[in-house]
């Protein structure tokens, strides 16, 4: 059957093309993609082409489909997997398979599977590594965001602490402890707030800082202090801009003792150093934000490392168990990653979006891969809606959902948006 997909041919060379998929083998699965959210890793892969560690050297002649944060329907199951999967199931995929120790991943390395496509053939190695993950929740956009959400879940699990006299690492955030998210009012930070409030292990105090009051105000509307209190968490939004001694104020909020867990959501040296300064005894700092500069560095108090047993950890991505946990929490309605989404479009805008991703403000850009749509910010739906009735209606729907992308909007788009030619 035919698919339409965005493929990498080389550095900054992405092409939206329609071509024949190979016949599905007995050990393969045919799937229809509905959504793919754009990751900065896609931008890096597109710019680097074959120089990227996950992209094959021969992409100029054997191009690969880009996109690794996707969800859709299973359409046909080869007989090897017939007892495990069935046609009609919704799914997401863990791209970091680790198959035979390689870096190969859907969205970077394969000719016939990637998120920016209408249909794909899922190779046997994905199922062999248990990376095809059924999704039983509503809609598709949440499942697409299970991969970035798994990064948040993985970071919380990667935190570690010790007891005096013991070398055993106690994994995860301190339950009932004090936790801080520095520069945490952005889309990924909001996802972390959601998880820490509604996940299985919760802090007693959660302080979220930023230097942009409008972002903090928006965060407070989406992740409310009242909801956190119902979950047993004291949630505080705190603007550190202009304060002569933000460290002292942050410690005061934590009762003077500092924080058991600190997550740094911006690759900015003063923010890292602020996080180090507010750690409690045996506290752990998670450097979540990935820097673009290979020589990024910040000062760290090694006196406290030695005498106060402070720790530092960095995480980049989540594993399959983290994705399963994300999908389960979404299916149960406990977390909602919609706060990450700031733009929506169709596959026809995907090439430009990926290549210019570092120049487009906001959070996640969600692509509906069967549709011909421009990339539009949710905040611009009303403006674009003056010329396009589809976005006017989507704007009305989102306003009823606190300005967030939502299941009602997705269902309206899937029913009324112009489909891509040939889809």
Image (cartoon, grey):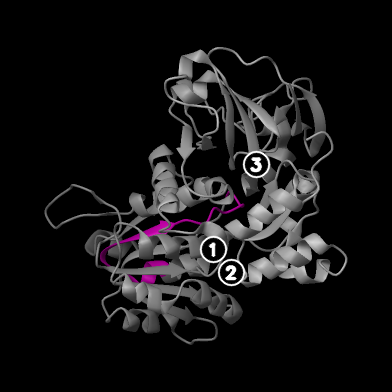
Q: Earlier in the sequence, mark 3 or mark 2?
A: 3
In the image, residue 229 sits, relative to residue 27, either above or below, namely: below
In this picture, residue 51 sits left or right of residue 313:
right
In the image, residue 53 sits, relative to residue 413, either above or below, namely: above
Which of 30 and 37 lies nearest the eye of the viewer? 30
Q: Magenta span has 407?
A: no
Q: Which residue is mark 1?
A: 266
Q: Which residue is mark 3?
A: 34
Residue 14 placed where, x, y %? 79, 36
Residue 257 placed where, x, y %? 26, 76
Residue 244 placed where, x, y %? 48, 87
Q: Are marks 3 and 1 in contact (CB under 8 Å)?
A: no
- Magenta residues, as a range? 275-294
Q: Magenta span has 283?
A: yes
Image quarter hosting the C terminus: top right
Instruction: Identify the residue at horizontal 47%, vertical 71% (top origin).
Output: 223
In the image, residue 22 sits, relative to residue 59, either above or below, namely: above
Q: Residue furthest front?
A: 415
Which of 155 and 167 lies nearest the eye of the viewer? 155
Instruction: Identify the residue at horizontal 44%, vertical 73% (top origin).
Output: 208
Q: Nearer the viewer, mark 3 or mark 1?
A: 3
Helix, strand or loop status at disc 1:
loop
The crowd level at tag 2 (other Cα within 10 Å; few <14, some 14-19, many 20+) is some
The crowd level at tag 3 (other Cα within 10 Å; few <14, some 14-19, many 20+) is many
Q: Which residue is mark 2?
A: 401
Helix, strand or loop status at disc 3:
strand
In this picture, residue 423 sits left or right of residue 206:
right
In this picture, residue 10 sits left or right of residue 235:
right
Residue 210 placed where, x, y %? 52, 75
């Amino acid at each position: 059957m035919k698919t339409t997909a965005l493929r990498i041919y080389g550095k900054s060379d992405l092409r939206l093309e329609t071509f024949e998929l190979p016949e599905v083998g007995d050990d393969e699965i045919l799937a229809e993609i509905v959504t793919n959210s754009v990751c900065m890793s896609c931008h890096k892969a597109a710019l680097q082409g074959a120089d990227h560690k996950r992209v094959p050297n021969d992409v100029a002649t054997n191009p690969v489909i880009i996109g690794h944060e996707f969800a859709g329907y299973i359409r046909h199951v080869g007989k090897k997997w017939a007892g495990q999967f069935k046609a009609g199931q919704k799914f997401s995929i863990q791209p970091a398979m680790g198959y035979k120790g390689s870096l190969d991943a859907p969205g970077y390395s394969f000719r016939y599977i990637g998120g920016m496509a209408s249909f794909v053939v899922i190779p046997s190695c994905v199922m062999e590594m248990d990376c095809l993950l059924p999704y039983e929740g509503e809609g598709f956009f949440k499942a697409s965001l299970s991969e970035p959400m798994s990064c948040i879940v993985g970071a919380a699990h990667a935190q570690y602490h010790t007891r005096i006299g013991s070398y055993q690492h106690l994994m995860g955030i301190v339950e009932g402890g004090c936790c801080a998210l520095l520069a945490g009012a952005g889309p990924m930070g909001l996802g972390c707030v959601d998880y820490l409030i509604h996940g299985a292990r919760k802090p007693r105090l959660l302080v979220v800082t930023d230097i942009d009051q409008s972002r903090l105000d928006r965060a407070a509307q989406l992740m409310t202090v009242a909801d956190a209190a119902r979950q047993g968490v004291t949630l505080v939004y705190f603007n550190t801009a202009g304060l002569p001694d933000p460290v002292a104020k942050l410690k005061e909020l934590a009762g003077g003792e500092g924080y058991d867990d600190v997550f740094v959501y911006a690759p900015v040296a003063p923010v890292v150093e602020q996080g180090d300064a507010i750690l409690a005894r045996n506290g752990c700092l998670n450097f979540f934000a990935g820097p673009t500069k290979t020589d990024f560095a910040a000062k760290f108090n090694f006196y406290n490392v030695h005498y106060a047993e402070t720790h530092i950890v960095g995480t980049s991505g989540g594993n399959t168990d983290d994705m399963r946990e994300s999908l389960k929490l979404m299916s149960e309605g406990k977390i909602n990653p919609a706060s990450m989404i700031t733009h929506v479009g169709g596959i026809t805008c995907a090439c430009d979006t990926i290549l210019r991703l570092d120049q487009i403000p906001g959070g996640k850009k969600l692509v509906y891969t069967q549709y011909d749509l421009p990339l539009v910010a949710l905040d611009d739906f009303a403006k674009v809606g003056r010329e396009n009735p589809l976005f006017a209606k989507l704007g009305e729907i989102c306003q009823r959902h606190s300005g967030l992308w939502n299941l009602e909007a997705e269902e309206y788009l899937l029913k009324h948006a112009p489909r891509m030619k040939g889809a």
